[in-house]
Amino acid sequence: MTGKTANMQKAQAMVLAAGLGKRMRPITDTMPKPLVSVAGKPMLDHVLDKLASAGFDQAVVNSHYLGQQIIDHVAQRAAPKVLTSPEMDLLETGGGVKNALSLLDQDAILIANADVFWTEGRDALFDRLTSAFDPEHMDALLAIYPVADGYGYDGAGDFFWQVDGRLKRRGDAPSAPYFFTGVQVLSPRLFEGTPDGAFSLNVVYDKALAAGRCYGLVHDGGHFHIGTPDALLASEPVIAKALEIERAKQATSQSGGN
């Protein structure tokens, strides 16, 4: 069993934790970025805890830079059970997933970056993604977020979200209204014919986009871009307030259902 509902059984999870974290130096001189603490616990644990809450009893975590720290850390977890996928050479995002395919579901894979932080909206993001993924029409479902609302995000955006839910890259446009959050559901068939070794997940996104099978889902909670030590310091009080609001909403929802 990979999830708590029939819908969720379509996907098994992988968390990408092999990046170098260069912008987070000097903190990452001695630890990998996924183990940097945000709101009292490592970013990786925030993602894994969300997977556990969504009903996933197993997840794959890859590692490379200071990878033994990742392996030792996840070995302490009971839920979800973590299978590790160490990389001797950095395989980038696409190569990392391809390297772990034998450990993953054959129908669909829920994938999240280990170094992202978000608060939930009306429903948990993982639940929304796995419920919305339709393999008859989709090969990729990417969680996206409005550029104007992303805390700490200063990029030009990645995608236009079209009326039918399909995504279109920013391309030559000076800006696009949505950026990719680092959370997604992908069909393993996207990796057929991809390069051996290191490559970006952009390779499989482009394949899905060209086939008209890449869709977007707008996250309705909070999203925090934490790329540098200064950004981490500045974001902590904002995140603390956002988590307080999130907990209050959850408490209200639970009391209303009793």
Image (tube, helix red, strand yellow):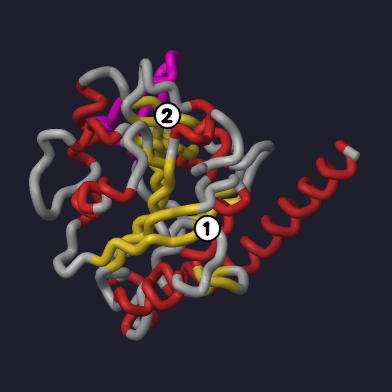
Which label number is shown at residue 80?
1
Which label number is shown at residue 236?
none
Residue 105 belongs to magenta span: no
Q: Residue at x 36, y 48 (%)?
A: 155
Q: Residue at x 44, y 61 (%)?
A: 82
Closest to the observer, 12 or 195: 12
How would you classify the magenta stretch by its main secondary structure?
loop
Judged left or right of residue 220, residue 255 is right
Residue range of the region highlighted in magenta in the rendering: 157-174
- Image coordinates of residue 51 in percent, x first then y, are 54, 51
Closest to the observer, 62 or 43: 62
Q: Is residue 128 above or below residue 221?
A: above
Q: Nearer the viewer, mark 1 or mark 2?
A: 1
As measured in the structure, the alpha-carbon distance from the residue carrying label 1 to the one carrying label 2 is: 26 Å
- Image coordinates of residue 6 in percent, x first then y, are 56, 30
Quadrant occupied by the C terminus:
top right
| Crowd tier of the residue under label 2, counting other residues whose Cα lies within 10 Å: few below 14, some 14–19, many 20 or above | many
Instruction: Report the amino acid beneath label 2.
Output: Gly
Q: Read off the residue under disc 2.
A: 216
Instruction: Report the amino acid beneath label 1.
Output: Pro
| Crowd tier of the residue under label 1, counting other residues whose Cα lies within 10 Å: few below 14, some 14–19, many 20 or above | many
- Image coordinates of residue 168 in percent, x first then y, are 31, 25
Instruction: For the residues labelled 1 and 2, say whether their Cβ atoms are less than 8 Å apart.
Output: no
Judged left or right of residue 246, residue 96 is left
